[in-house]
């Protein structure tokens, strides 16, 4: 466990990283994405931040509050239905037209629903897209900018916030869950494919570090969709001893986003922790809510040995090609 005092002490030094860090927060207009963006702006020197989401009025309010936190910050809203891969491409083009490097890609979009398979007009389940495919599309699109930052000896990191440590068996004959969809299968596939993808990408992009994180119990408002505001408040009140306060979650995710403990393979730090594959400083990390290393290694080791990790990534690229066509 990384002590909260250690987290806060580290975050207070982030101006040492220099000015003009660029961060993209997918799902940055609410919940963990919003609170991490606030922490990032508060602690860094003249940062440039992009909030990706659908709620423009909420984003405008957040952007004004970010300016008050740091007068030298620049924050922009990029409207995007993140569940649609074509919309993801357009959002990335907007960012790429303004930035030649990205230091942090932070992804936490999600949906809480009890519905069955709910396809977008692109033929991809909305929940599985928000939790996996769209995140990986942002990552693939912005890898040139992340690599530019990393090869310039700057911070280069991506974080996908979902449920690292809860990896489970995949249905390898139906990775997109066209025929075997259930909420449990959807969760298992999104979580496990996030973890495997981070490893696969770290192996081929050593200038960037890749993190799949589990946030713990955080009252982000998502449960309101299932239980209503009152029911959600009652639940989190009863679970208070196990709940991570939202502002603390932001500080902890900022630590994960910036600490050399989770360094890229090319810039391996002396104090780097054990990576997802069991190697210190591997560039791919599976983290629990408190910054400690996690991961269901029984499942993951098997998928490393039998080539499933590569199969999952090839499947992901195949979905991109079928929906969006080949990248030029």
Image: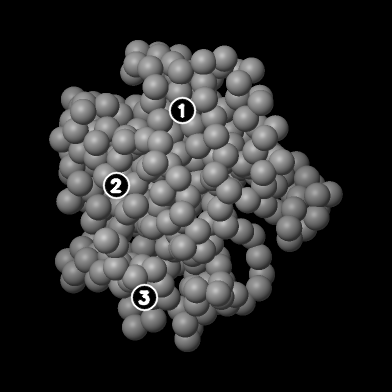
Question: What residue is at 57 percent from the left and 39 percent from the top?
Answer: 77
- SS class of the residue under badge 1? strand
Q: Position of residue 99 (x, y in %)?
A: 37, 35
Image height of 72 relative to 84, above or below: above
Q: Position of residue 140 (x, y in %)?
A: 32, 54
Q: What crowding class fits label 2: few (fewer than 14 Cα within 10 Å), some (14-19), or many (20 or more)? A: many
Quarter occupied by the C terminus: bottom left
Residue that carries the numbered disc 3 in the rendered image: 322
- SS class of the residue under badge 3? helix
Question: What residue is at 30 percent from the left and 40 percent from the top?
Answer: 145
Residue that carries the numbered disc 1 in the rendered image: 48
Dot 3 or dot 2: first in sequence order is: 2
Question: What residue is at 56 percent from the left and 53 percent from the top?
Answer: 80
Q: What crowding class fits label 3: few (fewer than 14 Cα within 10 Å), some (14-19), or many (20 or more)? A: few
Residue at mark 3 to residue at mark 2: CA–CA distance: 20 Å
Q: How many marks?
A: 3
Q: Pick whichever, 138 or 303, lies toward us.
A: 138
- SS class of the residue under badge 2? helix
Q: Pick whichever, 326 or 161, lies toward us.
A: 326
Image height of 42 relative to 190, above or below: above
Q: Is residue 292 visible?
A: no
Q: Position of residue 223 (x, y in %)?
A: 70, 54
Image height of 201 relative to 207, above or below: below
Residue that carries the numbered disc 2 in the rendered image: 143
In the displayed orientation, state which residue is furthest to the bottom: 179
**Quadrant of the rendered structure where residue 188 is?**
bottom left
Residue 111 placement, left or right of 231: left
């Amino acid at each position: 466990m990384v002590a909260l005092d250690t987290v806060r002490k580290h975050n207070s030094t982030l101006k040492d990283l220099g000015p003009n860090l660029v961060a993209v927060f997918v799902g940055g207009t609410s919940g963990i994405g919003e609170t991490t963006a606030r922490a990032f702006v508060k602690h860094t020197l003249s940062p440039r931040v992009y909030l990706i989401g659908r709620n423009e009025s909420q984003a405008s309010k957040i952007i004004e509050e970010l300016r008050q936190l740091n007068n030298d910050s620049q924050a922009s809203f990029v409207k995007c239905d993140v569940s649609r891969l074509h919309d993801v491409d357009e959002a990335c083009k907007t960012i790429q037209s303004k930035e030649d490097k990205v230091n942090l890609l932070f992804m936490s979009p999600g949906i809480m629903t009890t519905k069955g398979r709910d396809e977008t007009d692109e033929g991809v389940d909305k929940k599985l897209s928000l939790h996996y495919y769209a995140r990986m599309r942002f990552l693939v699109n912005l890898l040139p900018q992340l690599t530019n930052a990393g090869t310039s000896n700057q911070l280069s990191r991506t974080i996908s916030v979902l449920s690292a440590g809860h990896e489970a068996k995949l249905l390898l004959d139906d990775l997109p869950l066209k025929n075997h969809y259930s909420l449990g299968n959807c969760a298992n596939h999104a979580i496990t494919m996030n973890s495997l993808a981070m490893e696969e990408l770290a192996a081929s992009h050593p200038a960037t570090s890749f993190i799949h994180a589990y946030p713990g119990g955080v009252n982000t408002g998502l449960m309101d969709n299932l239980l209503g505001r009152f029911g959600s408040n009652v639940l989190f009140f009863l679970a208070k001893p196990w709940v991570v306060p939202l502002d603390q979650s932001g500080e902890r995710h900022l630590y994960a986003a910036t600490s050399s403990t989770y360094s890229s393979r090319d810039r391996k730090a002396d104090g780097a922790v054990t990576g997802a594959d069991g190697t210190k400083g591997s560039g791919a990390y599976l983290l629990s809510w408190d910054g400690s290393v996690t991961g269901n290694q029984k499942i993951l080791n098997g998928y490393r040995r039998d080539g499933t990790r590569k199969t999952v990534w090839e499947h992901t690229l195949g979905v991109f090609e079928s929906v969006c066509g080949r990248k030029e």
